[in-house]
Image (cartoon, coloured by chain):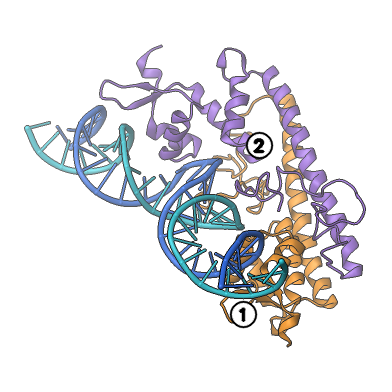
Chain colours: A purple, B orange, C cyan, D blue
Amino acid sequence: MDARDLLPMGEITSRSGFAASAIRYYEAEGLIDAHRSGGGQRRFERSVLRRLAFIRAASNVGLSIEEIRDELGRLPGNRTPTKADWHRISRHWGRRLDEQIAALQRLKVGLDGCIGCGCLSLRSCAFSNPDDVHAEDGAGARLLPDSLRRPHPTRRGSSA
Amino acid sequence: MDARDLLPMGEITSRSGFAASAIRYYEAEGLIDAHRSGGGQRRFERSVLRRLAFIRAASNVGLSIEEIRDELGRLPGNRTPTKADWHRISRHWGRRLDEQIAALQRLKVGLDGCIGCGCLSLRSCAFSNPDDVHAEDGAGARLLPDSLRRPHPTRRGSSA
DNA sequence: TCTTGAACTCAAGTTCACTTGAACTTGAAC
DNA sequence: GTTCAAGTTCAAGTGAACTTGAGTTCAAGA
């Protein structure tokens, strides 16, 4: 490729809307690639812009950097997504969004149920006790999936 | 109040499901109060259990510690929520959940719209560009409200 | 050539909601 | 009186996703 087709950092930041530090971070994390100028400055291929758009979209759906890396890595030849890729991926993301929506709706229904009772009991109220830590009967589905629990590393796994 | 009505830490952790460290943290943050035994150990009033149930419910709805503190502080006399308080509060939370659901649904609709086109364009695709950073016309509502943007302190405010 | 803004590296900082560890004390039971 | 689980404090660590700062170099225009 011709060196004149490569974009400098400033171009990438202004066109993608990401800060330079974020771009460097993504490169360090292996989400995007960069060439270097004689003096060591980054020079990006145009396709990086599409990758960045993809990254932004994915992160809006709530994917972590690692998940985005996986998703990008699943693209054959590590290429920028084609229409077919995008088709498959967006169906995947759609399912994920559906799950999140359903989870919030369960929470809402639980809350509506609670408005009448006002109990907020540690033992029986499913809303204040979604993990069923003390539930008297092995009642149903957890209200919130992990993807919507306030992302907190140290809480993960230790359900308390 | 009679000292025999006060509960020690172990009782609180086992009944509330919170770790002792979390209880201490909540006390330090001013979400709950504690008396002290002669030797300096914490002794809790029974009502603290209801406060903790409230805290758990609030955090499931996605409120931050600060928001929970505010919400508790809005209770007249800083009391444990009554039925009427709970009524008002749960309607508030319900609206919040509704917003979150609506936001995810907008995202989903945007995604469905994108499946056909496959464009993922930085300039025009609302899905990859929900902030309308480069939008050509001042098009509509942001897809995701801040409450559902991946909570990331340093990203807050700097919409890029 | 000079200047100046853009870019570089690397380490450390940020936020949130806690947890962990070390070193020590309490208090209830035997 | 001894024991030991349960409790205490305080500082530091955790993870994600970057940002900030310090100090240095690049590169394009006048």
Q: Furthest residue to the bottom?
A: B1
Residue A40, quarter of picture: top left
Element type where label 2 sits in the image: loop
Residue C26 pos. (x, y %) = 57, 75
Q: What residue type is disc 2 on? A: Phe
- Residue at numbered disc 2: B127
- When the figure is inspected, residue B72 is found, relative to residue B3, above or below; the finding is above
Q: Nearer the viewer, residue B82 or A87?
A: B82
Q: Which chain is disc 1 placed on? A: B
- Residue at numbered disc 1: B37
Q: Nearer the viewer, residue B34 or C26?
A: C26
**Mark 1 or mark 2: which is in front?**
1
Residue A146, quarter of picture: top right
User: Is residue B158 at least partly visible in the picture?
Assistant: no
Q: Is residue A48 left or right of residue B31?
A: left
Q: Which chain is disc 2 placed on? A: B
Q: Is residue B73 left or right of residue A103?
A: left
Total labels drawn:
2
Element type where label 1 sits in the image: loop
Q: N-terminal of the two: label 1 or label 2?
A: 1
Circle 1 crowding by C-alpha within 10 Å: few under 14, some 14–19, many from 20:
few
- When the figure is inspected, residue A25 is found, relative to residue C4, above or below; the finding is above
Q: Residue at x 80, y 76 (%)?
A: B85
Q: Nearer the viewer, residue A157 or A72?
A: A157
Q: Residue at x 70, y 85 (%)?
A: B77
- When the figure is inspected, residue C8 is found, relative to residue B32, above or below; the finding is above
Q: What residue type is disc 1 on? A: Ser
Residue B2 pos. (x, y %) = 74, 87
| Contact (Cβ within 8 Å) of mark 1 with mark 2 | no
User: Is residue A47 at least partly visible in the picture?
Assistant: yes
Question: What's the CA distance linking mark 1 and mark 2?
Answer: 57 Å
